[in-house]
Amino acid sequence: MDLGLAGAKAVVTGGSKGMGLAIAETIAAEGASVAVMARDQVALDAAAERLRAAGAPEAWGISVDMGNAESIAAGFAKVAQRWGDLNALVHTIGPGDGYFEEMDDSDWEAAFALGTMSGVRSIRASLPLLRAADWARIVTLSAHSIQRQNPRIVAYTASKAALSSVTKNLSKSLAKDGILVNCVCPGTIVTASFTEALKDVLAADGLDAEDPVDVMKWIDANFHQPCDLGRAGLPEEIASITTYLASRRNGYVTGATVNVDGGSDFI
């Protein structure tokens, strides 16, 4: 299927690793130029090389601190100077986590700075570029936990719920501009960072943190949140639906909150 992304211009925040990089690579494979934003310039340069290899006519990394308003504005100013317009913004940034009793005000403020305000600021900075393009899409990544609560990630979930609400609201206000706005809510996804963080924990139970089936066994046992397919997801499975929603081929889906969770009771 031709997604109409050839010749398009896209920004993926958090695009140097994990789901963000998978999304950026999938967009690049469709022939779009892709800019990825994250803090680590070395990781960004490596990501840009992968995007060029995937098929992006132009790929580059912009070092941005997504917790800082001025840094975000400066990053998108570089996009404006280089491209002048923008067809797709995909925002994938998320904060850390913790139990309620472990978190003070500064932890909550940091969670909302990354989980909500980084999206607000990125969209605000990109809107003139999106409005200048022939067509434009915005996709944010929220989280399955906004519908399936987990005490371990209380601030993370609250900030992502706020982002999902902002996304839904923007779909209404930007409809008049022809800008389609949607939110993707991943379930448990086996990324490299997930595996690295939990490999010893799962190994203690005789499980492999790289195996999607073992990962879901651990999730079910510890959090009682199974999925119908019986396995965790992969970054490329988030990338495929996100890329469609960010593409010109998507002409009528807006205001949607899309669960990509392997099957659950939530709609």
Image (spheres, rainbow, N blue to C red):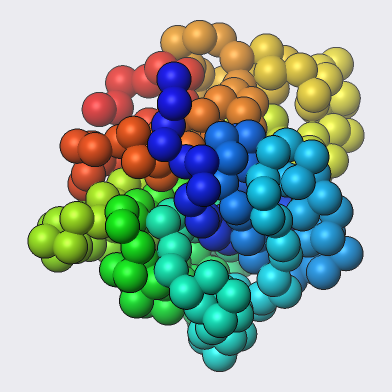
Q: Is residue 66 above or below residue 90?
A: below
The image quarter containing residue 15 is bottom right
User: Considering the image in quadrants, where does the C terminus appear?
Assistant: top left
Q: Residue drawn at (67%, 49%), measured in percent from left and top? A: 57
Image quadrant in which the N terminus is located = top left
User: Residue 199: which quarter of the image?
Assistant: top right
- View extreme (top): residue: 229
Q: Residue at x 65, y 65 (%)?
A: 37
- Left or right, residue 47 beside residue 228: right
Above or below residue 72? Residue 97 is above
Identify the residue at horizontal 19%, vertical 37% (top origin): 252
Q: Is residue 205 visible?
A: no
- Residue 108 lies, in percent from the top left, at 51, 73
Above/below status of 227 relative to 168: above
Query: In the visual, does 189 lie left or right of 63?
Result: left
Residue 185 horizontal side relative to residue 58, left or right: left
- Left or right of 115 on screen, residue 218: right
Residue 42: x and y in percent read 88, 64
Judge whether residue 220 can be spotted in this image: yes
**Picture coordinates of residue 188 (x, y %)?**
57, 31
**In front: 228, or 57?**
57
Front one among 35 and 22: 35
